[in-house]
Structure formats: structure tokens, C-alpha cells
Image (cartoon, rainbow, N blue to C red):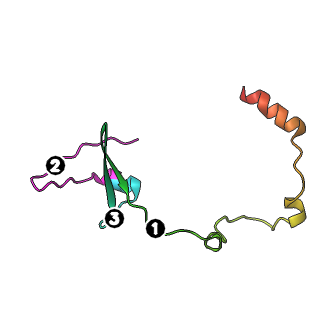
């Protein structure tokens, strides 16, 4: 979490510090939602309304190496000893 201070201008404008704009990838023209809450004001990016379809994700994950055959992907997973050992380590 980043905390910064901004000053309200006589025209009611607030400049969001560059470090926060960069962190949130907010650029000039980016639409924001201002919401009042019991503890103050919440400022968040307006959703773009752009929805992704399954086809939009094709090729999203890149893998170096040969493709894995369907038979290998569909093979049942046997947790057995490996699962029990990882459970013991996580305690």
C-alpha cells in the first residue's frame, strides 16, 4: 500500500501523485469513480466494460518446450506421499 498527500485546489481539483498514477497505470483521461464511505472517500478506476471471451485468451500462456499430449494432461493425479509430505512441511 502506498500513502501520499494531495491538496484540494480552489476549483476542487486534486492531483494524484505520479508515483501512485504509475503504480495503478492511470494515465490522462482515465475515468475514476469517487465513492463516499463511512471512513472517507474511495477513489477507484471505472471498469472499462470490456469483457474477455475465451478466444481472447488463446496464446496468453506461453510455454517453452514441446506441447504436452492430451493423454498426459488428462491422466489422473496421484497425490499420495508427495501430498502428505508437503502437508507436514507446511505445518
Instruction: Give the Cα distance between marks 1 and 3.
Output: 13 Å
Query: Nearest the camera: 22 or 78?
Result: 78
Left or right? Give the position of 32 relative to 70.
left
Q: How many marks?
A: 3
Q: Which residues are magenta?
A: 1-20
Q: Tag on residue 49? A: 1
Disc 2 target residue: 8
Label 1 element class: loop
Instruction: Give the Cα distance between marks 3 and 2.
Output: 19 Å
Residue at 66% in and 71% down: 58
Residue at 83% in and 32% down: 85
**Please, what is the dominant secondary structure of the magenta stretch?**
loop
Q: Position of residue 63 (x, y in %)?
A: 72, 64
Q: How would you rate the neighbour count of disc 3 (Cα within 10 Å): few for under 14, some for 14-19, many for 20 or more? A: few
Q: Position of residue 26 (x, y in %)?
A: 36, 60
Does label 3 or label 2 sit earlier along the sequence?
2
Q: Is residue 33 above or below residue 58?
A: above
Label 3 element class: loop
Q: Position of residue 90 (x, y in %)?
A: 72, 30
Amino acid at each position: 500500500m502506498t500513502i501520499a498527500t494531495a491538496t484540494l485546489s480552489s476549483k476542487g481539483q486534486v492531483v494524484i501523485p505520479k508515483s501512485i498514477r504509475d503504480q495503478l497505470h492511470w494515465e490522462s483521461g482515465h475515468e475514476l469513480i469517487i465513492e463516499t464511505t463511512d471512513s472517507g472517500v474511495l477513489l477507484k478506476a471505472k471498469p472499462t466494460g470490456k469483457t474477455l471471451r475465451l478466444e481472447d485468451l488463446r496464446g496468453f500462456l506461453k510455454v517453452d518446450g514441446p506441447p504436452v499430449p492430451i493423454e498426459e494432461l488428462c491422466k489422473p493425479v496421484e497425490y499420495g506421499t508427495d501430498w502428505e509430505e508437503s502437508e507436514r512441511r507446511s505445518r
